[in-house]
Amino acid sequence: MREIIGIPSLVGDYDNYIWVLYDSSIQQAWVFDPGEAQPVLAFLNTNHLALKAILITHRHFDHVDGIPELKAAFPSAIVYGPQKTPNALIDVRLQEGDQVTVSPELAFDVLETPGHTEDHISYVNADSLFCADTLFTGGCGRLLGGTPQQYAESLLKLRQLPDELDFFCAHEYTVDNLRFACYVDPENPALQARSRALQIDYPRALNQAPNKLGLEKSTNPFLRFDLPPLRDKLRARGCDDTPASLFAGLRAWKDQVDQGVEKIE
Ligand SMILES: [Zn+2]
């Protein structure tokens, strides 16, 4: 049976999760965005797992720096990654519409989701969405290479996926994100309930399926910027009605809060 664990990485600096899919019955594992190798190798060794594939979403160091050491330990592991990522260690280059079959019973469709960076892709199948820094629990990544228009389109693309998908992102920023979400969308009952029920145990490894995408759709302001009441608030802050403008306005709003320019308490 396939299982999944979110291994904390770069704790205190970037608070990443490295997601490892594994099947103990065949002693195989597949890893997403290993920003470092050691915690992954420790998990694989402890559980007697062989690494079959490394799946990369974008070029940032906290998603790729573990590749060389993992490849040294498992030379036959195949590295999948975006067509646009400037990283020579990627063996198989992927773009929108591609399908990757990492084992006979495990495949993903590739979605291009630029915005956080210009090269970002996400992996999706009937069970799960791995979207790294495109969409976080309660928030989204910063604009570090892509355009607001790209980012808005990527988020609206993810919003069309089924509610039931397990949703895996690459950082644990939930507390901070929901604080901002409650500030900009205070009347949202689903968000209030989520906020009340919130229990984060980071940096403990996450070994149960985390949130469903449907919960993000109902509570994450970065999937709701074009809907009332957020849309109206963003209009009042000078945005026009295009997704790019509304997204840019919301992202800039969060950046101002993050930088302390606007205080929310
Ligand atoms: Zn990133």
Image: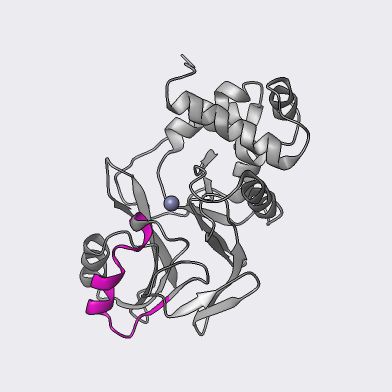
Residue 53 percent location from the top left of the image? 40, 76
| Magenta span contains residue 227 | no
Q: Quadrant of residue 260?
A: top left
Which quarter shows the N terminus? bottom left
Q: State which region is magenta.
A: 62-79
Can see residue 239? yes
**Image coordinates for residue 22, horizontal then vertical, percent:** 38, 71
Can the viewer see residue 6? no
- Up-down relation of residue 190 to residue 92 (above or below): above
* Image label count: 0
Viewer-side residue, 167 vs 235: 235
Which of the pair 216/152 is nearer the observer? 152
Q: Residue at x 66, y 21 (%)?
A: 187
Name the residue at 33% across, 42% down. Answer: 202
**Rendered residue at 26%/70% (across/down):** 44
> Does 64 appear in magenta?
yes
Q: Position of residue 219 (x, y in %)?
A: 61, 36
